[in-house]
Amino acid sequence: MSARARGDRGAIAASVAVMPIVFTLFFTVIQVSFWYHGRSVATATAHHALEAARSYNATAEDGRTAADEFVGIAGGIKDVQVDVDRGAEEVVVTIDAEPVSVVPGLQKHIQVVLTGPVERIVE
């Protein structure tokens, strides 16, 4: 008969019970990090689109093109929809996107709206 230390009784069962909690916490932290990164990419995309669309003699299409090029280089977001509204005095850029997901159901939508004045000659 082998002698067993009584202090180790049930140690494996406790480890097995803790592992799902550790994995859930780990993947939740990763998902939140992907959301923050996606928000940063969406904000930078909106900034690039705004700067391109508000330039002197630019169009809303110039802003959309700049946004598409930036997202193609940066990545980090998917299902990107870019809306650029260029008026006579103001440009409004709206970016709607989804972050990359590793945990189904923990996906939060990203929306960024930036406005700025149009570059023009004022007398």
Image (cartoon, rainbow, N blue to C red):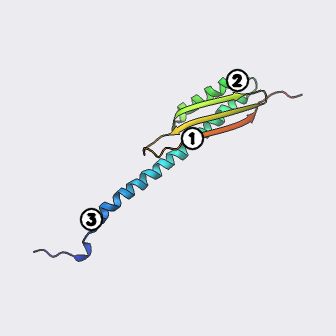
Q: Earlier in the sequence, mark 2 or mark 3?
A: 3
Q: Residue at x 50, y 48 (%)?
A: 33
Residue 5: name its quadrant: bottom left
- Amino acid type, residue under disc 3 in the picture: Ile
Disc 2, SS:
loop
**Residue 86 % position (x, y):** 72, 27
**Residue 121 % position (x, y):** 84, 27
Judged from this view, the residue extending furthest toward the left is 1
Q: Residue at x 62, y 38 (%)?
A: 44
Give the position of the C terminus as an image quadrant.
top right
Calculate the distance from the C-alpha at mark 2 to the C-alpha at mark 1: 25 Å
**Residue 77 % position (x, y):** 52, 37
Give the position of the N terminus as an image quadrant.
bottom left
**Residue assigned mark 3:** 12
Q: Earlier in the sequence, mark 3 or mark 1?
A: 3
Residue 113: name its quadrant: top right
Q: Nearer the viewer, mark 2 or mark 1?
A: 1
Disc 1, SS:
strand
Q: Residues within 10 Å of mark 3 (few under 14, many from 20)?
A: few
Q: Earlier in the sequence, mark 2 or mark 1?
A: 2
Q: Residue at x 34, y 58 (%)?
A: 19
**Residue assigned mark 2:** 59
Residue 110 numbered mark, or none? 1
Residue 13: name its quadrant: bottom left
- Amino acid type, residue under disc 1 in the picture: Ile
Residue 53 numbered mark, or none? none
Judged from this view, the residue extending furthest toward the front is 105
Q: CB atoms at circles 2 and 1 under 8 Å apart?
A: no
Taking depth in this image into account, of 62 and 22 the one nearest to the observer is 22
